[in-house]
Amino acid sequence: MAGKALVREAHEARVRAARERFFQRGDGEVDGVTSVVLRSWSRCAERGIDYRAAVDRDPAGRAALAELRERSGELLEQAGGIMEHVFEQIRASGSMVILADADGVILHSLGDPDFVTRAQRVALQPGATWGETVRGTNAIGTALIERMPIEVCGGEHFLDRNGFLTCSAAPVFDAEGRVAGVLDISGDYRNYQPHTLALVRLSVQLLEKRLFEHRFARDLVLAFHSRPEYVGSLQEGLIALSADGQLLGMNGAARECLVGLTGGAPSTSLNNLFRTSFGTLLDRARRDPASLLAVELRDGQQVYLRLKTTVPVRAGFSAMRQADCIVASARGATAPARSAAKSPQGVTLEDLATGDAQLQLALDRGARILGKDIPLLIQGESGVGKELFARAFHNSGPRRDGPFVALNCAAIPENLIESELFGYSGGAFTGARREGAVGKIQQAHGGTLFLDEIGDMPLGMQARLLRVLQERCVTPVGGSAQVAVDISLVCATHRSLRDLVREGSFREDLYYRVNGLTVTLPALRQRSDIRRIVMSLLAREAAGESDRALGISEEVMRFFERYPWPGNVRQLQNVIRVAVALLDPDETMILPKHLPEDLFGTDEYDGAKPMSEEAPRAAPVASAAVSGVPVAASLDEIELQAIAQAMRETGGNVSAAARRLGISRNTLYRKLGRMS
């Protein structure tokens, strides 16, 4: 302790001498501070910032802070758990963990109460701006300008009043290399710890990885490194690819490795990076998704690469943009029931309330605008239930007796979306029906129009939709007469419309038209009501099991609660469906052996494996894997293909096929009935 005190006193003496030379003598060539701090001091002096300025409190108001937090919603969402973990490591050290946006505005903080009170005296609190132009040299603002991790201790702060602080901060970068925010640990300078900056840098690496994987959850992601043991670590390079092999984004490690090959071009093809073609990589990944492939970059450097994605690898990625679907979870369901949950067609917002706080916030916000002419925008990952939420919103309002018309803007070819949305007159184009057709907008008259994945709507269609929303009239393709329409508009997207506006692919005026109220649906891994969802889905799958009541073992339930569920509720539904199918007639409890093998196919989920994961499983999925059925297919496809293959190989003998599949004859009869 005495040694640390001496080191701190020596550092303080050097900084005091440097401040005196810089501020009193105007000497720009000073020792005692780093070149980064000296550059920052010089910038502050050039801007005329007074280092003796009194305290000014400028935190944004509650409404303004709420808007800023909404703008950085994804950053906040992914950083929350990391910040809590970091704070647990530094608790009772007189410190706080801080997250700020790209402008240096503090969005969220966690800290020891005593230090938080001191920090508030200099406005180190949510809503306050800590950009360098406002607060002078400080870790948050200077890290944003320097675009690198920064440590500012004691008198290195430009403003005298901040001299009691020691701050370590690192900027957070998105997949395009832009600064998304900054993570900071601040404390009393007398409690300076040399490892704090390393903790911040490690936490930012984890945050950047989560942001990347969240953004490209529906795309193909490749992980690579020059050393095989680093693939799967925080040091791995990550690149996201479209279905045709175009780069969608890279993390910092990949950008550093590939910058000489990409030339900074955001749309560089994978074929321009690796000597192995995109198609060959996909073929190899399809055969063994967990394998580590040795490939060469175009500059001759060898790297080790692994497919790191939850999206099934299929030619064309045809399943990647399918419409969201979800089974309604009955409110309050705590045990398996023989009656199925309420049909999604009749579900209301109240039915969706299962006790999760994040979902309840979305439900409450949606309920407040029922019956009001306010468009609703639903955000969330694929499979979280955006269409179900939209239908529940419709069923809960005064338009419940009107039509609910849905259109997936990403699933319809660009040359057909215009006629689908606006309809067409007879003979409007080659192949058009003589009598014409009514478009989705007109079909929704008196009810609700749900536009799923509106971020994928072509720009030309956006202009026409905007006119409809403004004039409340629609003109069919090839027609001249306007038809008045009365619709409630609900839109959904898994993308950030703000980013699309900045990129020029989404009209700003349309954005403000559709974004009346935004609600964000939590991913399944973030929800606290997984048990209720599981039991509700099980009740639906067991609806035809009139002779037995099904249950789930506590071991499997705990596994469900730990598993990250990249496919959200849709994936959980498929898992439960397969598990029920694998039960023998005399079995009523779902055990680890009944779970599909692909849940344990990658090292990423090792921590979620149930203790009995090594137990023998029924054979359908395993048989599919060894008999040529692609393991990347959906669970339903694996099941159907395995059954069909077993029936072919046994010449239609049900008993022999059941033995080959490892299930009972009655179970196979039931599955054959579903296939017919």
Image: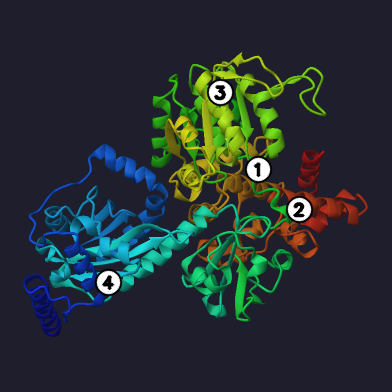
Is residue 604 rendered to the left or right of residue 272?
Answer: left
The secondary structure type at the circle numbered 2 is loop
Which residue is under mark 3?
468
Tell whether label 1 touches label 2 (CB within 8 Å): no
Label 3: element kind: helix
Q: Residue at x 52, y 26 (%)?
A: 489
Do residues under tags 3 and 2 come within 8 Å of each other at their CB atoms?
no
Cα–Cα gap, marks 4 and 1:
45 Å
Q: Is residue 439 visible?
A: no
Question: Which residue is label 4 attached to?
Answer: 196
Earlier sequence position, callout 2 versus callout 1: 1
Q: Nearer the viewer, mark 3 or mark 1?
A: 3
Q: Earlier in the sequence, mark 4 or mark 1?
A: 4
Which badge, 2 or 4, comes first in the chain's sequence? 4
Q: Which mark is residue 663?
A: 2
Q: Earlier in the sequence, mark 4 or mark 3?
A: 4
Q: Residues within 10 Å of mark 4 (few under 14, many from 20)?
A: some
Residue type pointed to by label 1: Gln
Q: Return the residue found at the far bottom.
A: 3
- The quarter of the rendered structure image containing the C terminus is top right
**Of callouts 3 and 2, which one flags the residue occurring earlier in the amino acid sequence?**
3
Q: Which residue is mark 1?
A: 322
Give the label, 4 or 3, closer to the camera.
Answer: 3
The kind of residue tagged 4 is Thr
Q: Is residue 643 above or below residue 477?
A: below
Label 3 environment density (alpha carbons within 10 Å; few <14, some 14–19, many ≥20): some
Q: In whole angstroms, how far apart are the C-alphas of marks 3 and 2?
A: 56 Å
* Residue in front for this viewpoint, 498 or 29: 29
Look at discs 3 and 2 and give the one toward the viewer: 3
